[in-house]
Image: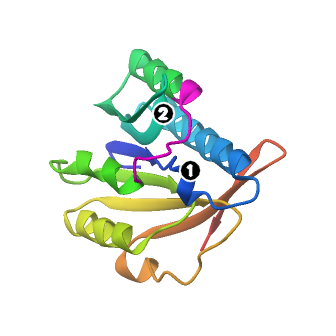
Amino acid sequence: VSVDSYVVLNLLREDYQFKEYEAYIESAIEIAASLIFYLNLKKQKFGFITNCIIDGEEKIIHNPISSGSEHFIKVVENLAVVQFSKEIAFEKAFDEFSSLKWGISLYVITPNVKEEMIRRFIDLFKAGHSITIFLVGARIERDLGLSSIGLQLYYTEIESGVIKILPL
């Protein structure tokens, strides 16, 4: 874990092309909440970004990097009320990263990694950021070759209340 981190959650409905998509979206939210809890527990500064519907409005929620109990509570409150997005592409969330300071860790929670996202990840990696991708969903994408370019890729699932993280 670096000094500063961002948790980036993909909630675009279209990306969850699974039979039980609602359960996978809920799992993604739980994984994000657990990661945020861990970062807060370790007294790390963290930010949070997601594409979602909140209060009936499509938007990108961006909680900038901060720390402390007020920040933690605000992010968790957002996670408690978000719904999947019907319109805002996940890639839009990365527009918020135009001026990141060097060395921030990005923890990306998504059901898939599209080609346009791989390009963004490579650019962010080259700019000095570590990127860890947690795949959530019914399909596992093993042959992305992301580890060869410095990105970390894991498959995540929740079983009996325990989050399992499997390296790919």
Question: For this view, does 124 lie left or right of residue 16?
Answer: left
- The residue pinned by badge 1 equals 13
At a point 49% along the width and 25% down the height, the residue shown is 56
The amino acid beneath tag 2 is: Ile
Q: Dominant secondary structure of the magenta stretch?
A: loop
- Residue lying at the far top in this picture: please name it: 70
Write the start and end of the magenta stretch as one range: 79-89
The amino acid beneath tag 1 is: Arg
Q: Secondary structure at mark 1?
A: helix
Give the Cα separation between the discs numbered 2 and 1. 11 Å
At a point 32% along the width and 51% down the height, the residue shown is 92
Give coordinates of residue 9: x percent, y percent.
Answer: 48, 46
Question: For this view, does 20 lie left or right of residue 16?
Answer: right
Q: Is residue 96 magenta?
A: no
Give coordinates of residue 23: x percent, y percent.
Answer: 73, 46
Which circle marks residue 167 in the picture?
none
- Tell which of 88 and 34 is nearer to you: 88
